[in-house]
Structure formats: structure tokens, C-alpha cells
Image: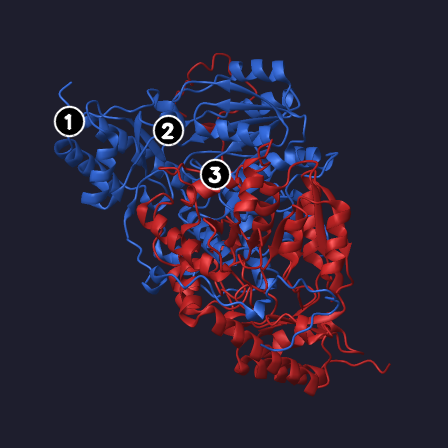
Chain colours: A blue, B red
Amino acid sequence: GEDIVYRGQIEPNPVVRPWYNMSLRVPPPQSLREALKVPDRYMFGPGPSNVPPRILEAGARPVIGHMHPEIFEIMSDIKSGIQYLFQTQNKMTFAVSGTGHSAMECAIFNTVEPGDSVLTAVNGIWGERAAEMAERIGGRVNAIVAPPGGIFTNEDIEKALSKHRPALFFLAHGESSTGVLHPLDGIGQLCHKYNCLFLVDSVASMGGSPLHMDQQEIDILYTGSQKVLNAPPGTAPISFSERACRKISSRKTKPLSFFLDFNWLTNYWGCDDKPTRVYHHTGPVTAFYSLRESLAVLCEEGLEASWERHRTVAEYFHAGLENIGLKLFVKDKQVRLPTVTTIIAPHGYDWKEITSYIMRTHNLEISGGLGPSAGLVLRVGLMGCNSSRTNVDMVLSALTDALQHCHRSKV
Amino acid sequence: GEDIVYRGQIEPNPVVRPWYNMSLRVPPPQSLREALKVPDRYMFGPGPSNVPPRILEAGARPVIGHMHPEIFEIMSDIKSGIQYLFQTQNKMTFAVSGTGHSAMECAIFNTVEPGDSVLTAVNGIWGERAAEMAERIGGRVNAIVAPPGGIFTNEDIEKALSKHRPALFFLAHGESSTGVLHPLDGIGQLCHKYNCLFLVDSVASMGGSPLHMDQQEIDILYTGSQKVLNAPPGTAPISFSERACRKISSRKTKPLSFFLDFNWLTNYWGCDDKPTRVYHHTGPVTAFYSLRESLAVLCEEGLEASWERHRTVAEYFHAGLENIGLKLFVKDKQVRLPTVTTIIAPHGYDWKEITSYIMRTHNLEISGGLGPSAGLVLRVGLMGCNSSRTNVDMVLSALTDALQHCHRSKV
């Protein structure tokens, strides 16, 4: 080796071999000599959903800098697209560089300080996860709990707001684990009566079901890229109301995460009034390309048309399921999520055999339950471009086939 | 509208208009009617670097489920590829679903508990950011500080370890803000003498400069996808030694972030010994495809060949810079980062005019300083496929051109 003397390394430890004397101990793995293999299948589970070629191609455009003017332009387009999607005028609207869970943490980390009271509505997995996140950062968390498939009345919610006086109330609009679309009307107003921020998770519902962030007085709203938007997972649109911003700007402590810090993120996204943007993190530029494209697709169709399409396709699907003798997990038609349908796991069958059979025989993903609905349901997601009568027919025929061919116990 | 009665919504607030009476208030933005425009340029800044078509194409393959067997196979290949790249046998090796900053937080959030003593080596921006992250979560942070461009002797480090008795010591291997490649020999051993974990940031250096995680006794090591690996930004390889795992498993408190929780992440990546994987977050599957492809490219060339290529190209570049009258910011040849070169901002010029001129005239990104090096330097990154003599010649000719055509004050 060469005679390398590090500056100032006065007394090198004789036991330590310098790097130039070290040989590789770990060989390159054999597996990476094989070409990447990716199957093309129908993604009719609760997400991610299929990504149309147009959006995949957008994500394969050349990488540019995360601080180049062209990416700021693309980010500005994304911001406008999210404002339309969310129906909000909020300046503080952007996309988190992560999946829905990152956005959930971004919302909670920025609005909750240690010791703050937090109320979560738990009627599936998402309320549980929000509670866990708030607890980890020192929130005093209370929950109102409904059985899987259930919802809360505004009276239930007001009682809990009045009792716990939370700084933040979490509710999942689309409870993808149970297939519930929670009513939102009046809840924002109730929260504000009790000086509480209203945080809504719309990962599974956004774009597939009516939601008006400003008119419904939602303070923090987020979704994911991989559901109705039909982009790959990896970015998460989010927006903060002025009321949420006031809570954030009156914080006594810094948010625990630098990566998710609201002030840094909104500066990077050009949402604040500062003249220059400071380097925060390296934005996932190609994921921004595909997110922009997915928002463009949605704008072309129009929100109301998309809502209506999801509604009518879901009704057609639900009627079809009952026709083949299956039962819907959510009894009340008015609170059925149009994007993700939960079907009571057919009596006498092993649900895992059904999903495996359908994947193997029809190259089609549907899934079992999640969290509190595990073992109870089958879940079918028809989101964005996947929401069509043709796809419903395909799922119904796959289910019919599975019920004929999977093992049925003689109970 | 239809006559919708929500279950249990006994006393609807008459002031609140239900969603089906609301009309859209925010129109679709005009900007999204225009096609996505992305320029193709030479990305010779400190990152992201250019992504070869092969890797972009991998990332445009169809989306599959984040829990499908095929993605677990791909994640397993990624894990093996990272073990090779890092030269480690650590079981707890995976990729964070985020950029380098997420990985930095993943390392710190999991190994530091409130009240733990943390030591950071600050000789550029990365040590400052690590200090900020550790402080936010309640670490008692001390720093050793060197001027930008400087390094620390093992004596400096031992003195600080002995004084502050930290649980974690942070050092940037590749200080991309200053262009310094920090020596690592003996530091892991020193840390372990003082019962301290050794955390190394190799975002800018990994794959471009020798590093042997196990032999150099590094406890936590991470990098980014968008530098030498030439994948788009959005994933961050990371690995934890057994010593780091012991610290994590003896925690008294849960890590503050659910999204970055080591136990959840290592289960999702199949690193633990549990028989099943539990849904944690929706992995960015297409980003995993491109990360796998980038690791395959690196394995094809071989680590040592890649190190040698970056070394010789950097030497050729540095000699060429001196030939055209420019001065390198890092005086000591032995601690120059081969991937990112810092050039003293030419006397009498406005550095911004130089970088803008080169972008405009040569379609080529080089950048100014960052953090403590802002205003002091120009930075040129030649990483992964960009590290070639042809590209060096291109940069040298662009710089020569800029020095001739940019405004020079008569000082």
C-alpha cells in the first residue's frame, strides 16, 4: 500500500488495520446477477392500486436537482393540484416525502407538544396508529372507540371533546381496514367550538368520495399517492389550515423531527413568505413527477366526476356481491367507503385460501382484513383508474370461481 | 339532494351544510393542463446525480403490493446488495423509505433516548444537522468543532469521548458541504473503548471511497440512493451492528417515531427472526426497484473497481483544476472526498454568476457551498456513472469558459 499519513493522526492504534490494507470480506450477492423480475397484476386490494403507463412514464423522466427552478415549478403545480383535490385555499399545502404514515406523523409531530391532550376516534386501525404516534411523542391520548365497521355520532364526539378538551382530534374519513366512510359534516365546527384542531386521514377516500376541506372546517388533511391518485407509493399530499398554523407557530418546543418540521417543509415548498428557499432535504424528484401527473389526470376528469364514478361503480359492485351470496361488512349503505369494500369472510371458507386462489388463478390481488378486521373480512379496492364496471365484473367472476373451487368445511 | 340520514346523527347542526349541498370552490389549476416538462441535464452538483436509463426504467415497472412475495424477494436482494456495499454481515440491514435525512433520523431516533449523551463531530453541515436532530429528541448534545475543510485527530476524538462519555458519536465520512473525506481508522475501536456507538454518515462517500463497516467497527451506517448509486432520491440504505441492536433492545422508552421504529422496520424487511411480517407502512415499491437495479450495477463493476475509478478520476480532475488556475478548498490530498470536490470560489468573481453561466451555457449543474461553506466554494460532484475523465474534461472546459465570460471585478 501507499504511505498514507493522516493529518494529526499522531498515535495510530497499532491494532487497527488501516483501510488500504483491508480486503473485501463480503462478496457481491449472486441474486443481484439476475434481472429484476416484476409481475404485472390487477391491484384490487386496499392499495397500492395500479399505476397507468402515463404516470409510470412521468416518474421515469430524468432526475433534476431538488432545488432547480424547474422542480419548484413542478412542486407549485402539485401544490395547486392538491388545493383542488382537497378543495382548500390553504397556503400551507404540499406533499410529504414519504408515505401516508409519514404524513400522519407530520400532522401529529407539528401540532402536538408533549403534554397536549389528543383525542382519537378508533373504529379501525388508523385511529389506533394515530393514538400510538401521539403517545410516543408525549401526548396525553384519549380515544373514543367503536367496534370495527362502526361510526361515531356527532353527539359522541361532542361529549368526548367536552370531557377531554383535546388540542387535536383525529378521525379517519376512509377507514380502509373496515370499509367505513365516516361522515364529516359538523365535526369541524364542533372541534372549533371546543378550540380543538380537526385532523382527518383521507388516505383511502380522497378523490373517491366528496370532501371539502375548507367548507368542512378540517384543519389538517392528508392522503397518499398510491390510492385513488394511482401514483406509486412514496409521496403524501397534506394541508394545514390557518388555525393549525397558529397552533404550530405558538409552540414552545421544536417539533421532534427535523425531517418533518413544518417550517422547514413549507419553506422548501415555497408556501411561506420568505424570499429564498433553504436546503432541507433532497426531495424525491421523480416521485414528484409522477404525483404531478396523477393530479393532472384527476383534474382532467374533474373531482365531481371522479366522486360520481366511484359511487356508482361501488353501488354496482355491492349489488353484484349480494347477488352472488356475499354479505357486506358495513350494513349502512350511507357509510360504505366507495373505494375499499369490506366483504364478510364467507362462512365455512379459509379467507387466505380465497385470496391465494384468486391471486394464483386470476392474477388479481384482493386482501384479507387488517388490524381489528383481520380474519373477519375480505377487502377489495377499486380506486382511481381501477374503479370501473369491467373491473367489478372481473372481481365478481374471480370471487364466484373461488367460492366454487376453494375448500368449504361442512359446518 | 338525496335524503341522507347518518346513523345516530340525532341532532344535526342546522348551520352546517351537508357535503351533498356543497359545490366546488376551488377550480382545477390551469397549470396542470400543460404537459410535464423535465429538462435533461448534466447533474454534476453534490447530488442527486444522473440516473442511467437502465435504473430509470427499473423504477417504471408496474407497481405490486408492498407485502407481496415478489417485493420481499426484491427487498432481500437489496439487503444483500447493501451488505456488500457496506461490507457488513449485519442482519439488521435494510433501506429506509425516505432520503438521507430520514436515515439520519432513523439512526438517531432508535439509538438515543431522552437524556442520553450524544457527541457529534462538526466540520461542515452534517454534524450540525445530527446535533439538531439529537437535541430535538432530548439528547444531551456536545460537539467537537473543526473549521470547514478540517478534520479531527483520533486524539481529539478520544479526549471528547473521555470527557462527555456519549452513548453515540456521529461522524460524516463524506462531508459534502466541505469536500472532506474523514479518516475512519481506529475511531470505531476508540468509541467501543468508551462504550459508545459509532454512527457514520456516508451519504456522499459510499461506493466512491473505501469503507469496511464491520472491520472498521462502525455501529450504524447509512447512505442515500441518489449519489454514487445513481438511483433517484427517495430510499436510504442503513445497517445496525449487534452492539447497536443491544442498545436499542435495552431502551426504556419507545422511539419517538412509529414510522422510523427499528423493530417495525426490521420486521418489515424480514431481518428479525419472526415468522411473519406485519404491515407497517406502504413501502415505495418502485423506488425499491430502482434501488435494486442500482445495487446490481455496482455489483457488476465491483466495489474495489468503483473506489479506484472514483479515486483516479478525482485525481485527474484535481490536477486539471490546478492547471486552469483554480485552488482546491481541502489542502491535504489524503482527505479530499473523491466524489464531491470543493473549489475555492475564484477571487474577484461572483460564484452565483459562474454556476448560472455554466447551467445556462453548458446545461450542466455545479453548485455553490452549503452551510458553513456557503459563499466560500464551488462544488462539483462526479458520482457513480458520472465519474469519468470525459465528464472531468467537460467540467474543466465549462469552468474555463465561465472564467473567461463571467464578470471579474478589478480588485
The spot of residue B44 in percent (x, y) is: 58, 72
Q: Residue at x 65, y 43 (%)?
A: A262
Q: CA distance from mark 3 to mark 2?
A: 25 Å
The residue that disc 3 covers is: B264
Q: Considering only vertical position in the picture, is B386 above or below B229? A: below
Give the residue furthest to the right. B411
Mark 3 belongs to which amino acid? Trp
What residue does disc 1 label? A408
- How far apart, in angstroms, are the residues tagged by discs 1 and 3? 35 Å
Q: Give the SS element for disc 3.
A: helix
Mark 2 surroundings within 10 Å by alpha-carbon count, few (fewer than 14), some (14 through 19), many (20 or more) = many
Task: Give SS at disc 1.
Answer: loop
**Is any part of residue A217 visible from this angle?**
no
In the rendered structure, which amino acid carries the disc numbered 2?
Gly
Callout 1 environment at 10 Å: few (<14), some (14 to 19), or many (20+)? few
The chain carrying label 2 is: A
Query: Residue at left 32%, top 31%?
Result: A341
Q: Which mark is residue A179?
A: 2
Instruction: Give the letter of the chain under mark 3.
Output: B
| B231 relative to B304, above or below | above
- Of tags 3 and 2, the one toward the viewer is 3
